[in-house]
């Protein structure tokens, strides 16, 4: 069974700092990996999807890397803003698109 | 365009009652997933539908849980004889047909179920 670990569990930074969120997973036989953000009381918003054949994916201030063989992914958020405050979830995708989620990293960006 | 919608947004029920949760996927998305997010448990997969194929029910926690998808679109998750441990947020997601590694899953806002 896929086990997903996200470190740190919580992170508080001043506005403008870069964020580094780590995700590790035990089963490297994945098809892709998605990063989501979840705001309190809301559903999940997809941020980035990395195919298993890719090493990284970028969108604006977000960059996600994937090292499938070692079971690691990292989400970088540049020049953080208060609006980036949310919980970030890592989800490796297995067969038929089934996602296995980590517990998340709760991020607070203070003005 | 319209995203994934779920109803009701909140449901409070008494232990032992049956509940139905509804999901309307994005139009044209043939893959539909149900997940559950419990306090202290994180997000867990429950069931997956793909077109007219038999659903993958491997994540359903007990036989009190069932789901159907009518006409390849709307899905209903039914929990019979609810228990307090069923209290959670139930999330629905849809995507384009799988297997296709490019497919992002789009999530609805969820239904918060509270069993008293």
Image (cartoon, coloured by chain):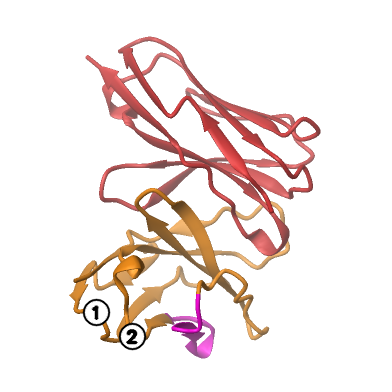
Chain colours: A red, B orange
Residue at (60% x, 41% y) in the render: A4
* Residue position for label 1: B15
**Residue A3 lies within the magenta run:** no
Q: Nearer the viewer, residue A26 or B102?
A: A26
* Tally of marks: 2
Q: Nearer the viewer, residue B116 or B50?
A: B116
Residue at (30% x, 86% y) in the render: B18
Q: Determine whether, in the image, residue B8 is placed left or right of residue B28.
A: left
The vertical placement of A34 against B46, above or below, is above
User: Residue B102 got which mark?
Assistant: none
User: Residue B81 got which mark?
Assistant: 2
Residue at (39% x, 74% y) in the render: B23
Q: Determine whether, in the image, residue B91 is placed left or right of residue A48.
A: left
Magenta residues, as a range? B62-75
Residue at (32% x, 79% y) in the render: B82
Residue A110, x across and y down, in percent: 24, 16
Is the residue at mark 2 from the same chain as the one at mark 1?
yes
Q: The residue marked by circle 2 belongs to what chain? A: B
Would you say residue B94 is visible in this rendering?
yes
Within 10 angstroms of label 2, few (less than 14), some, or many (20 or more) residues?
some
């Amino acid at each position: 069974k896929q086990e997903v670990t996200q470190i740190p569990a919580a992170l508080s930074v001043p506005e403008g700092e870069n964020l580094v969120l780590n995700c590790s997973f035990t089963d490297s036989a994945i098809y892709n990996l998605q990063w989501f953000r979840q705001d309190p009381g809301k559903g999940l918003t997809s941020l980035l999807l990395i195919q298993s054949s890719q090493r990284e994916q970028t969108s604006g201030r977000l960059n996600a890397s994937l090292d499938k063989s070692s079971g690691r992914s990292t989400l970088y958020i540049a020049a953080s803003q208060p609006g980036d405050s949310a919980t970030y979830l890592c989800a490796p995708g297995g067969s038929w698109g089934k996602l296995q989620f980590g517990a998340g990293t709760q991020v607070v960006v203070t003005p | 365009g319209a995203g994934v919608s779920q109803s009701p947004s909140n449901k409070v029920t008494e232990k032992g009652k049956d509940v139905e949760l509804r999901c309307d996927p994005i139009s044209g998305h043939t893959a539909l997933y149900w997940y559950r997010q419990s306090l202290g448990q994180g997000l867990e997969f429950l069931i997956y539908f793909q077109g007219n194929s038999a659903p993958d029910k491997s994540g359903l926690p007990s036989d009190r849980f069932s789901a159907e998808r009518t006409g390849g679109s709307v899905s209903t998750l039914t929990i019979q004889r609810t228990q307090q441990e069923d209290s959670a947020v139930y999330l629905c997601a849809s995507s384009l047909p799988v297997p296709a590694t490019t497919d992002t899953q789009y999530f609805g806002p969820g239904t918060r179920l509270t069993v008293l």
